[in-house]
Every structure is written in C-alpha cells, then in structure tokens.
Image (spheres, rainbow, N blue to C red):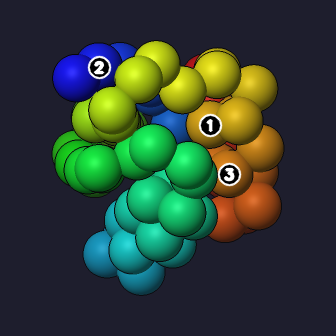
Amino acid sequence: MSTATYTVTGMTCQHCVASVTEEVGELDGVTGVEVDLPTGAVTVTSDAPVADDAVRSAVEEAGYQLA
C-alpha cells in the first residue's frame, strides 16, 4: 500500500473535488482519493506508488494544476 499527498490549485467547489477525484481515481492501481477542498490537499492511496507525472496529467485533465 502506498500513499502520497499533492497540493492542487484552482479548486473552488464540490464539483471541482468530484472532477479531480474521478480523474485521479481512474489511474491504474489507485484504490482511494481524498480531497480536502480548503487546503487543496489530494491524498492518493494505491497498491504501488503512482508516478507523479501520471497524477499531474490526471489533475490537468480535470482542469486544475499541481502546486
């Protein structure tokens, strides 16, 4: 089990949270995504470490940026 936390900028509402959760959650091996809207913290839990570039791409696909 692996856990990594990222900071995402640009999220302002629950729709933002849902978009990021959905995109990151579709990455191979990801078993959980928790988003804290006030801080922008996104915690990704996975079977094995997920490449930072893959998380960045998923966040950008959702319309946001990693800080």
Q: Mark 3 and mark 1: span between their CA atoms?
A: 5 Å
The relative height of residue 56 versus residue 35 in the rendered view (above or below) is above
Residue at coordinates 64% horizontally, 49% vertically from top-left?
A: 59
Task: Tally the numbered discs.
Answer: 3
Is any part of residue 58 visible from this angle?
Answer: yes
Residue at coordinates 77% horizontally, 44% vertically from top-left?
A: 57
Of 49 and 66, nearer the camera is 49
Q: What residue did someone put label 2 on?
A: 2
Mark 3 in CB contact with mark 1 (< 8 angstroms): yes
| Eye-nearest disc, 1 or 2 | 2
Kindly identify the amino acid type of the residue bearing the numbered disc 2.
Ser
Kindly identify the amino acid type of the residue bearing the numbered disc 1.
Val
Of 38 and 62, nearer the camera is 62
The relative height of residue 13 versus residue 53 in the rendered view (above or below) is below
For label 2, the crowd category at 10 Å Cα-Cα, with few meaning under 14, some 14 to 19 and many 20 or more, is few
Numbered circle sitting on residue 38: none
Q: Position of residue 45 (x, y in %)?
A: 28, 35
For label 3, the crowd category at 10 Å Cα-Cα, with few meaning under 14, some 14 to 19 and many 20 or more, is many
Q: What residue did someone put label 1 on?
A: 55
Kindly identify the amino acid type of the residue bearing the numbered disc 3.
Ala
Quadrant location of the C terminus in the rendered image? top right
| Eye-nearest disc, 3 or 2 | 2
Q: Mark 3 and mark 2: span between their CA atoms?
A: 18 Å
Numbered circle sitting on residue 58: 3
Quadrant location of the N terminus in the rendered image? top left
In the rendered structure, the answer to whether residue 12 lies left or right of residue 56 reads: left
Residue at coordinates 29% horizontally, 19% vertically from top-left?
A: 2
The quarter of the displayed image where residue 17 is located:
bottom left
Residue at coordinates 76% horizontally, 61% vertically from top-left?
A: 61
